[in-house]
C-alpha cells in the first residue's frame, strides 16, 4: 500500500471515529443548554491536547462527559453559563493535581480514597438522579416537568420509536453500526418527529452556512467552584477504567507508558481548555474504544484526524442550528436507556469488586450516598451549599475514611474458643 493510500485510509478512519462519538458528543450540550457547535470545537481541541500530553501514544478520543449533566444544569440556572465554565475550569485543575499526585505517589492512593464502595453508588446517583429528566422529556414535557412542550400521545410515540431503535441497534446491530445506537436513535426519532409535525426548520433555513461558534469566556464564582469540584471524583475513576480498557484492546500497558499521570493530566487539561470556550468538560469515550477494537485502528493519528474534523464541523453554523431543532421527546426516549446505563455501570462497579453488602460498613456508605443523591439532600445555606453528585462524592469519601474496617470473621467469642481448643490440644 502506498503512502498516499495509507494516509487516505487514516483520514477516513478518523471521520469514522467522529461518527461513532457524534451522538453522545452533541447530546450532552443539547441537554444542558450549551452550544453543540462549541462542544464539537472543544472536543477537537481537547483531543489534540490529550494527544500532545500523551505524546501520541494512546488511540483515544475525548468529548462531552455525561457525568456533568445534572451539575451543569443546576449551575447554569443558579450562577449562569460563564460562572459554570469557571467552575469546570477548576474541575479540570483538580484532574491535573490528581495527575501530579499519581506521578509522585503512584495510582494506589486513588483506589484507597475512592474504592468501588465509594465510586459505585456515586455513579448510580448520577444515572438515577437524572431519570426524572428523561421521563419528563419522553412524555413531551420540559426536563423539570413544569411545561408541556408537545402533546402527550405524540411525544410518547416519538420517544418510544427513538428508544426502540436505540435498543435494537445496541443489541442486534452488526459491525460498526452496533457502536452508534445513540446516533441511530436520534436519526429515526427525528424522522418520526418530522412526519408528525414536531420539527421546526425555520431557524436552520435562516442560519448562515458558516459562522464562528458562540464561544463563552469563563467567570469565576467561589460558590459555583465549590459546588463543581467534588463532581470530578467519578470521572477520574472512570478515566482509569477507560485507559485499562484501551490497554486491553491494543495489548499495550498505557498505565506505564505514557503513564496514568500523563493520561489523567491530558484529560484535565482538555476539560479546562473546553471551559475557556464555553464547552462541556471532556472525558475519554468508551464508544470510540469499541470502534478501535472493531476496526483495529490502533494508530493515534486516527484520533487526531477525528479531532480535526470535529473542529471544522463546529464552524458549519447551519449544521449546529439543525442539531438544536431535535425535539425533546427524541432525546427523552434515548436518555431512558442512557441514564439507566449509567446507573447500571455503578451497580456493576460494586458487583465486579464483590463489595459485600452484608457488611454494615459497606451498607451504610452505599445506602447513605444513594438516599442523599436521589432524595435531593442539600447541606449549607445560600449559594454555598453541597447537593447532588457533589454532596454524594464528599459523603461517600468521608464515610469510607472514618468508618472502621470490618473486623476479621473470627470475633472475640471465636478467639476465646480458639484458646480453649489450643488448651485441649495440648492437654492443659
Image (cartoon, rainbow, N blue to C red):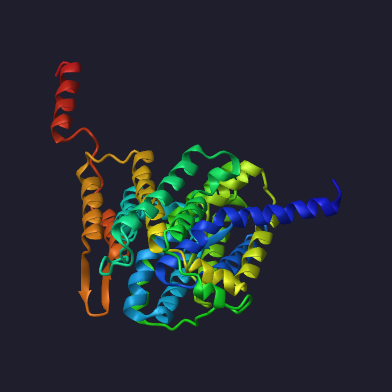
Expressed as whole percent of the image width and height from the top left, the position of residue 165 reads: 45, 46
Rendered position, 200 above or below 406: below
124 up-or-down from 67: above or below = above
Nearest to the observer: residue 311 or residue 221: 311
Q: Quadrant of residue 392?
A: bottom left
Residue in front for this viewpoint, 186 or 92 = 186
Q: Quarter holding the C terminus? A: top left
Q: Residue furthest right?
A: 2
Q: Quadrant of residue 318?
A: bottom right
Residue 149 is situated, as x and y percent measured from the top left of the image, at 33, 67
Residue occupying the point 38% across, 80% down: 80
Give the image location of residue 379, x and y in percent. 21, 70
Above or below residue 3? Residue 326 is below
Residue 177: percent from the left, percent from the top? 57, 45
Residue 253 shows in this picture: no
Q: Residue at x 43, y 54 (%)?
A: 237
Amino acid at each position: 500500500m502506498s503512502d498516499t493510500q495509507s494516509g487516505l485510509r487514516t483520514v477516513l478512519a478518523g471521520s469514522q471515529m467522529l461518527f461513532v462519538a457524534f451522538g453522545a458528543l452533541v447530546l450532552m450540550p443539547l441537554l444542558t443548554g450549551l452550544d453543540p457547535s462549541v462542544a464539537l470545537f472543544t472536543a477537537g481541541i481537547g483531543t489534540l491536547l490529550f494527544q500532545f500530553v500523551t505524546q501520541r501514544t494512546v488511540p483515544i478520543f475525548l468529548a462531552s462527559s455525561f457525568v456533568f449533566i445534572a451539575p451543569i444544569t443546576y449551575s447554569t440556572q443558579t450562577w449562569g453559563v460563564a460562572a459554570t465554565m469557571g467552575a469546570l475550569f477548576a474541575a479540570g485543575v483538580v484532574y491535573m493535581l490528581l495527575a501530579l499526585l499519581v506521578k509522585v505517589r503512584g495510582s494506589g492512593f486513588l483506589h484507597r480514597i475512592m474504592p468501588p464502595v465509594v465510586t459505585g453508588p456515586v455513579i448510580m446517583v448520577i444515572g438515577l438522579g437524572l431519570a426524572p429528566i428523561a421521563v419528563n422529556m419522553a412524555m413531551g414535557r420540559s426536563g423539570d416537568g413544569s411545561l408541556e412542550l408537545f402533546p402527550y400521545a405524540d411525544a410518547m410515540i416519538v420517544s418510544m420509536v427513538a428508544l426502540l431503535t436505540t435498543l435494537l441497534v445496541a443489541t442486534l446491530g452488526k459491525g460498526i453500526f452496533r457502536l452508534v445506537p445513540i446516533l441511530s436513535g436520534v436519526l429515526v426519532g427525528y424522522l418520526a418527529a418530522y412526519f408528525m409535525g414536531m420539527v421546526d426548520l425555520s431557524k436552520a433555513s435562516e442560519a448562515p452556512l458558516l459562522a464562528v461558534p458562540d464561544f463563552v469566556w469563563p467567570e469565576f464564582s467561589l460558590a459555583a467552584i465549590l459546588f463543581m469540584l467534588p463532581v470530578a471524583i467519578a470521572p477520574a475513576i472512570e478515566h482509569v477504567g477507560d485507559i485499562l480498557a484501551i490497554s486491553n484492546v491494543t495489548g499495550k500497558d498505557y498505565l506505564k507508558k505514557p503513564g496514568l499521570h500523563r493520561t489523567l493530566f491530558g484529560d484535565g487539561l482538555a476539560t479546562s481548555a473546553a471551559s475557556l470556550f464555553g464547552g462541556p468538560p471532556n472525558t475519554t469515550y468508551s464508544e470510540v474504544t469499541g470502534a478501535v477494537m472493531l476496526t483495529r485502528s490502533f494508530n493515534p493519528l486516527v484520533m487526531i484526524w477525528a479531532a480535526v474534523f470535529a473542529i471544522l464541523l463546529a464552524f458549519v453554523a447551519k449544521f449546529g442550528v439543525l442539531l438544536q431543532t431535535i425535539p425533546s421527546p427524541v432525546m427523552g426516549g434515548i436518555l431512558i436507556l442512557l441514564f439507566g446505563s449509567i446507573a447500571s455501570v455503578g451497580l456493576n462497579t460494586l458487583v465486579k469488586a464483590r463489595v459485600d453488602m452484608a457488611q454494615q460498613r459497606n451498607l451504610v456508605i452505599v445506602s447513605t450516598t444513594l438516599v442523599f443523591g436521589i432524595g435531593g439532600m442539600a447541606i449549607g445555606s445560600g449559594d454555598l451549599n453541597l447537593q447532588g453528585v457533589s454532596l454524594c462524592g464528599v459523603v461517600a469519601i468521608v464515610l469510607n475514611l472514618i468508618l472502621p474496617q470490618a473486623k476479621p470473621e473470627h470475633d472475640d467469642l471465636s478467639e476465646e474458643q480458639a484458646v480453649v481448643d489450643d488448651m485441649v490440644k495440648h492437654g492443659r
